[in-house]
Image (cartoon, grey):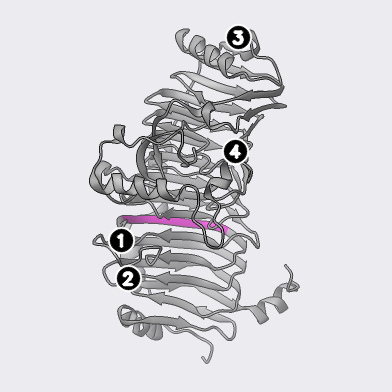
Amino acid sequence: MKNLFSLKKLRRAVCILSQGVFFLSVSASTVVQAEKTVHASVAASFSFSESEAILARIKAPVFAARDFAISDFGAVAGTDASAAIRKAIAACNAAGGGRVVVPEGEWLTGAIHLKSNVNLYLAKGATLRFSTDPAAYLPVVQTRWEGIECMNYSPFIYAWEQENIAVTGEGTLDGSAGWDNWWSWAKRGADTKSLASADVTKLNEYSSLGVPVTQRVFGAGHYLRPSFFQPYRCRNVLIEGVTLLRSPMWEVTPVLCTNVIVRKVKINSHGPNNDGCDPDSCRDVLIEDCVFDTGDDCIAIKSGRNEDGRRIGVPSENLIIRNCEMKDGHGGVVIGSEVAGGCRNVFVENCKMDSPNLDRGLRFKSNARRGGLVENVYMRNVKIGRVAEAILTVDHQYEEGARGEHQPIVRNVVIENVTSLSSPRVMWIAGIPKGTIDNILFKDCTFSGIDTAEVVQNAGRIAFENVTVTPLKKARSLNSRPDTE
């Protein structure tokens, strides 16, 4: 058959991948069928059924039926309620737990530090508007800034080594970030570095030299933006129902936490580095029924950067992502690039990804400076409308690329029953000679609107089973979709 991309050609192409770049151009409706022997090693590695044991372990924290309204502690709508919120949290914690209630209305605040057994509850119609004054996030706390530990401005909502904590309700968390405050710290001109450039360089130096975390002090006079919600070394964490707007940078980013649920959260924030949800060296995580509309990756799984990630050495593992909607963003589900501690057992299902400003569906990124073992990633039953680059991207040439001594590894990836309406290509895979990309299976997928050659470089086994690829011209005819859609 003239238009069949045969298994024999696929095998021959894979054999030469380590020596160059492989291009697959699709000029007509193409069906790719792979024999069972080709993908057996992938299928035998793990299965989606393993997610059932993870789900059985993940439990939402339970709180006592006690309410502590911030208005009872002196909060007045439209004024700074920071002190009242602190008092309400302390009282709730001392009483054995319950809800700290933010009533309907607009309330102003600085940093909020949660304590064990406290559920910060935003009533319908309630808005917590966070200050743009950096001093409202001092004194500094121990945090992880893009994968490196340091002492920096407090995240807007923060918890350190607490248990049973939550942020819930139908209200809104508004970070107030914009180009006249937080976002300007990352802005670059044509011939200028960002305000944060010197601090980022210093932080990386501290990590490389092994400087103790307590001596890596930033905060006042520096320009490392705080994240929005960051529980750190916590157990039993829930964020549910709320809407997050205008974050300085990363939005929901639990670090070194166990048993985390992110549920029915709506995120709309389009600033620089505005990732939606970044579990960082976390275990047993459920992200479900959320909407992401972001200025960076919608979901980005992390585990520390470079030496600091290897020093702590805790992977992100056992993550379930389901029933989510991804709109604008650099990637729908992303692993990396700060993944030096590794990542394993990620299950993605029943998600919708669609936007002309969404670049990729499933994305892996690392390099020889960051390294990291990433394995057992399963995506199924995902509907992709438009993406700007590819359904799958594996990028080990990211930033430093091959300049480093650490092997980035991606292996055991299954993409099953995934459909797309418009994507330039199915895969953009850029490995490096010292890295490993292996055991990738596409199964029962239909990809339409493909108009660009596939790219695979320095990769191992890639298999297809019952995959249909329809080029752009044919897809337009089949779907009657105008060019602008």
Residue 424 location in percent, x, y?
A: 58, 73
Question: Of the residues shown, which amino acid type is indicated by label 1?
Answer: Pro
Q: Nearer the viewer, residue 460 or 90?
A: 90
Q: Are marks 3 and 1 in contact (CB under 8 Å)?
A: no
Between marks 2 and 4 in the image, the one whose residue lies nearer the viewer: 2
Between marks 3 and 1 in the image, the one whose residue lies nearer the viewer: 3
Q: Earlier in the sequence, mark 1 or mark 4?
A: 4
Observer able to see residue 58: no
The residue at which mark 2 appears reads as 432
Q: Earlier in the sequence, mark 2 or mark 1?
A: 1
Residue 21 location in percent, x, y?
A: 39, 80
Q: Is residue 262 left or right of residue 301?
A: right
Question: Of the residues shown, which amino acid type is indicated by label 2?
Answer: Ile
Q: Are marks 2 and 1 in contact (CB under 8 Å)?
A: yes
The residue at which mark 4 appears reads as 265
Q: CA distance from mark 2 to mark 1?
A: 9 Å
At mark 3, the secondary structure is: helix
The residue at which mark 1 appears reads as 408
Question: Of the residues shown, which amino acid type is indicated by label 3?
Answer: Phe
Q: CA distance from mark 3 to mark 1?
A: 52 Å
Q: Quadrant of the C terminus?
A: bottom right
Q: Earlier in the sequence, mark 3 or mark 1?
A: 3
> Which region is colored magenta?
373-382
Q: CA distance from mark 4 to mark 3?
A: 28 Å
Q: Residues within 10 Å of mark 1 (few under 14, many from 20)?
A: many
Residue for point 53% across, 41% down: 251
Q: CA distance from mark 2 to mark 4?
A: 37 Å
Q: Is residue 306 left or right of residue 463?
A: left
The residue at which mark 3 appears reads as 73
At mark 1, the secondary structure is: strand
Q: Residues within 10 Å of mark 2 (few under 14, many from 20)?
A: many
